[in-house]
Amino acid sequence: MEGELELLARAKKGSREAFERLLTPYLPMLFAYGRSICGDYHAAQDVVQETAIIAFRNLDHLFPEADFPTWLRAITRRQALEARRKRPRLARFAEEAIERTYQDPAPPAVTVQKSALADCMHGLGDRVRVVIQEHYFKGEKLSSVASRLRMTQPAVKQLLYRARRLLEECVKKRLGTEAAS
Amino acid sequence: MNPSSCDRAREWMSDWLAGDLSMDEQASLEAHLSGCDSCRTVLDRLLLQDRALGEMVGASLSAALEARVRQALASIAPVEATRKSVGP
């Protein structure tokens, strides 16, 4: 099976297929990172597409010693900031915290969280789960979720806050149980 | 730090992650975070959870994202060899 270096060598010679194979494992991370910066589910998908085009066109600009996912992330960052141009500028605390969170392209902590979150989502009450589903998985703004659920926007914000806390508690409990067994 | 102001800050963090925090609230959150280690730790935990959820969403969209990427790559001209190398 071809490794990243072999795929990269073929991609640099113009193989789209090799480039797609290199890029595919990083698509979820690039989407999540782009979404964090530009704050929009739909725009983040455009950002990922633009990242792919820019990266493919500029593969020859990639230093041999450079880390491929770090380079992709840098392109995504530029594109996501551009997509955010019409919205308020990211606060300093936000920019720094996002960069800390995404510094490692594939941290074990995120892998572990994803596995536990998938189970914990099933344990949420209906309304709380719907808010997570609509906002995260369907990309709905909180105002749209509020209309759909016939709730006020502040009430939806409270539900989302509660969902985050419940998920955090559940993940912590689950990981603690796994570590003990 | 006053516990009630920490509670408020944590609600603001959730609103910020949802893209629903006013500029005034954002400024208040920034000011709170600059003096509260415990809330900065909470922010990092919330962002880690947000990243995990975001990647789960990205994985659920992976077929669509792959198709978009494939289509976009197919529409661009063949890559021209360049001579200059630059870092990330």
Image (cartoon, coloured by chain):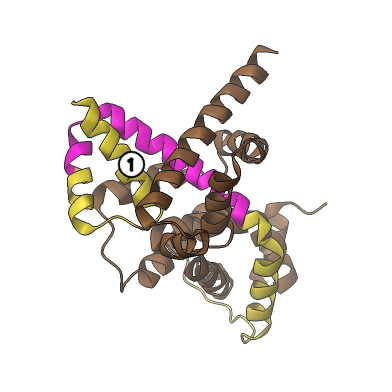
Taking the spot 18% from the left edge, 26% from the top edge, the residue there is B2
> What residue lies at 43% left-to-right and 69% top-to-bottom?
A79
Q: Which chain is yellow?
A: B
From the viewer's perspective, tell me whether residue A163 is left or right of residue A90.
right
User: Crowding at label 1, few (<14), some or many (≥20) Cα neighbours within 10 Å?
Assistant: some
State yes or no: residue B49 in magenta: yes
Chain of the residue displaying label 1: B
Q: Secondary structure at mark 1?
A: helix
What amino acid type is highlighted by mark number 1?
Glu
Q: Is residue A87 left or right of residue A111?
A: left
Asked which quadrant contains residue A38, the reply is bottom left
Who's brown, chain-wise?
A
**Residues rendered magenta in the picture:** B31-57
Residue A176 on image: x %, y %: 59, 18
* Residue A139 visible somewhere in the drawing: yes
The residue at which mark 1 appears reads as B11
Residue B6 image position (x, y, % from top left): 26, 32
Residue A156 horizontal/vertical position (percent):
43, 52
Is A86 rendered above or below residue B34?
below
Could one spot residue A30 in this view of the protein? no
User: How far from the left and from the top, in percent, is residue B14?
Assistant: 38, 45
Of residues A32 and A19, the one drawn nearer to the viewer in this rendering: A32
Query: Which of these two is toward me, A5 or A25?
Result: A25
Of residue A19 and residue B16, the one placed in the foreground of this image is B16
The picture quadrant where one finds residue A138 is bottom right
User: Quarter holding the C terminus of chain A?
Assistant: top right
A13 vs A116: above or below: below
State the residue at coordinates (65%, 62%). Answer: B61
Main SS of residues in magenta: helix
A135 is higher (above) or lower (below) than A44: above
Seen at 55% across and 33% down, the residue is A109
